Image: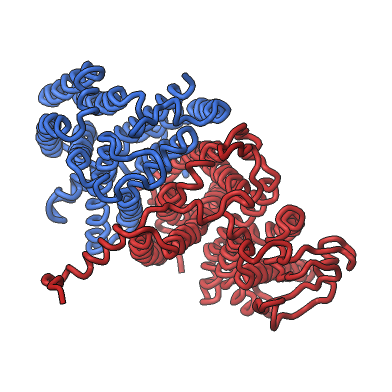
Amino acid sequence: MPAVDQYPWQPAAAVVRDWLAGPATSGDLSAARAQMGFSLAWHIILACLGVGLPLLTLIAEWWGVRTGDPSYRLLARRWARAMGVLFAVGAVSGTILSFEMGLLWPGLMGRYGQVIGLPFAIEGIAFFIEAIFLGIYLYAWDRLPPRIHMLTAVPIIVAGIASAFFVVCANAWMNEPHGFTVRDGRVVDVDPLAAMFNPASPPQTVHMILAALMVAAFLTASVYAVALLRGRTDRYHRAGFFIPFILGAVVSPVQLVVGDWIARFVADHQPIKLAAMEGVFTTSSHVPITLGGIAGDHGIKYGLEIPNGLSLLVGFSPNTVIEGLNQVPPALRPPVTGTHLSFDLMVLGGLFLLGLGVWLLLAWWRTRRRGETDPLARRGTRLFLWLASLSGLASVVSLECGWVVTEEGRQPWVVQGILSVRDAVNPAPGLMIGLWLLLAVYAAMTVATVYVLRRLAGERPVPVAPQEADVTGYPVT
Amino acid sequence: MLADTVLVVMWLGLMCYALFAGADFGAGLWDLVAGGSRRGRPQRALIEHAIGPVWEANHVWLIFVLVMLWSAFPEVFAAVMSTLYLPLTLTALGIIARGAAFAFRKASTELWQQRLFGGCFATSSVITPFFLGAVAGGVASGRVPSGLAAGSTVTSWINPTSMLGGVLAVVTCAHLAAVYLCADAARGGGPEMVRAFRLRALVSGLVAGGVALVGIAVLDADAPRLFHGLTHRALPLVVLSAVAGVAGLLLLLRSLWGWARAAAALAVALILWAWGVAQYPLVLEPDLTVARAAAPPSVLAAVLIVFLAGALLLIPSLGWLYTLFQHPKTGAAAGAEEAR
């Protein structure tokens, strides 16, 4: 029995030493994937809010300035305060991702960083513009005339959408690698524009930008749906609900069409991903759509089948042949259950949000036809608001599931057909340490963000920062 | 040639990060030592007022450098990030804690929250530049060889040059912040605040000079190649930096705040350029040069065009951001506000 445990910290020190001394293990690959996945899943929500919240805030401010209605201006200022916190957290959690690109996936960046550098470079400029004008928009409220102040929000919105576009271009490249040749093991003939505008870029970027608008809109609307349910039905809370909800309701049907577009694209370009999404194990015609279920050895078990559904959707004929997972050896197949269920859940969430929008449209139409004014005075409003208060959650679930589909569905590749995650990961030992540290910090940051946002929302009267004097007197129930 | 141009642009980004974001980190250090929550309140208010609107834009310079590095010198990015992943993970976590906690503190109203978030903000403001300096020391002393995780995960950043880099980064950030804050204090903080920050600026400037002097011995023993470069090809820059640093202190004594800012910034910038000149053209041990590490010309040209076009948008925008909050509110804007 060697006398090693003389000091209480020695076991821990030994663990750290072993981690750092030994070779990297497959556990390190899992840790790297978990860390990247976790920090991306976290950031993607903030990124969506960064795209959508400035637009909502500007609409509220514009309407408030136009009509002189203080309730809209109060909304704009409160949303701007929340935006300040969310943007800061989003900026730092986004920075972590650019670190992790190198810390976790140097095998990807060392070879292909040059190929996908361009969209990131443009995204960097866009992010710069966003940060500069956000500083001006948030802090110069009392230094600029209203019209100029509103104009400073425009670059934030444009740059936010541009950021989303270019970052997703880089992700699309991982699905559709173009713009280079591998010759004698070296990456040559690099064409950054061809890499950036790869075939997957149009459907993926549009799908993501619309998703970002939906998430920001429905998350904001659900906060005010809860308030309306609790009987706070003044102008302030109604505006807080209707501005974002209408935006979300307008975007949802467009997203349905775009979703169809991207699914067809995947069917053409990444058939194995589609096979995992729909749980198609064997290539054949007359393939059904399977809803739910889990993957067995030869197909999806316990799922609900719609006969010929997938063949009809993809090729408008039951005779359309759909490629199955058996086209590739088992080692090159993505995990089916997770991809399939995520896909179903994403679609379900999208349809739920679409349905809510239709419900409001019908209610509004009936209200108008009867010469009434308030669509929320109708019967069934409580059920509607109750469901609407879940719309934020539904939009986030759909968002995360959609992201899981595109990433899990590409496994084991990080760059489709070119580079596997195993070859991309940092070979250094001890990546597990980074994962645990990151989880601890993010847990604290999550708690603090939610807490601070709740406090910001609950502050009554609205704090008298100098620039907020003119709307402080507005009574909020 | 193209590769050298991109390298210079990237180094300009690094310089901007050091001069602007470095000062934001330094302000965090002064926040940390401002004293108890009652006594330190006016200083913390000044610091918050000074960095509030600008820190996020300043922070983007780091992303600029990272993106430049992986686009134009992908092998270097991969080698540095994979070997130095421990200090860089700690840097990343420090960046999270600093930015988030600063925003949280601004949004909270109760003392215990302000203390908690403020402490987090201030501590991470010290930790982050330290690890960044340690990373720079690891690269500069040739401990990061090319290849994936080819260097030691431990001694690549726990070594004399890295420790020197870390301490120097922290002290330099503190000095920059104190000098910058003198002008802010002169504008709206009152004479007592001006005296306080002038004292801090002088002390931190002297400490930074002292650390740099000790650093000569450290580099001589630990990083001979870098030392040779600094004492030969880059010597004029090193001397100029020292002159600018001393001049900055004298300007502080004469209360010429704007000139003192420029001199302090020049001293820091010149050290960064001296490092670059001393090490050029070698990027990573044993023999990876700028030309060999660079991406193909198509990529370099595309990246350069993007940044030149971006600069046309960014420079006027940044100018507006920095000047907008350096002046008291104008009567017109205040009147317009009342009319709303």
List x then y, in percent, for residue A212: 59, 55
List x then y, in percent, for residue A182: 61, 39
Query: Left or right: B321 with respect to A113?
Result: left
- The single residue placed furthest to the front in the displayed view is A1
Query: Foreground residue, A269 or A256?
Result: A269
Residue drawn at 64 percent across, 57 percent down? A247
Residue drawn at 67 percent across, 50 percent down? A206
List x then y, in percent, for residue B333: 41, 35
Question: Chain letter for blue?
Answer: B
> Would you say residue B189 is visible in this rendering?
no
- The single residue placed furthest to the bottom in the displayed view is A302
Q: Quadrant of residue B144?
A: top left
Q: Colour of chain A?
A: red
State the colouring used for the structure image: by chain
Query: Foreground residue, A382 or B108?
Result: B108
Where is the N terminus of chain A found, in terms of image quarters?
bottom left
List x then y, in percent, for residue A405: 62, 63
> Would you say residue A18 is visible in this rendering?
yes
Residue drawn at 22 percent across, 56 percent down? B119
Numbered label tally: 0
In this rendering, is residue A300 above or below B48?
below
Residue drawn at 64 percent across, 49 percent down? A205
Query: Left or right: B171 with respect to B5?
Result: left
Query: Left or right: B204 with respect to A330?
Result: left
In this rendering, is residue A270 above or below A311?
above
Query: Foreground residue, B45 or A338?
Result: A338
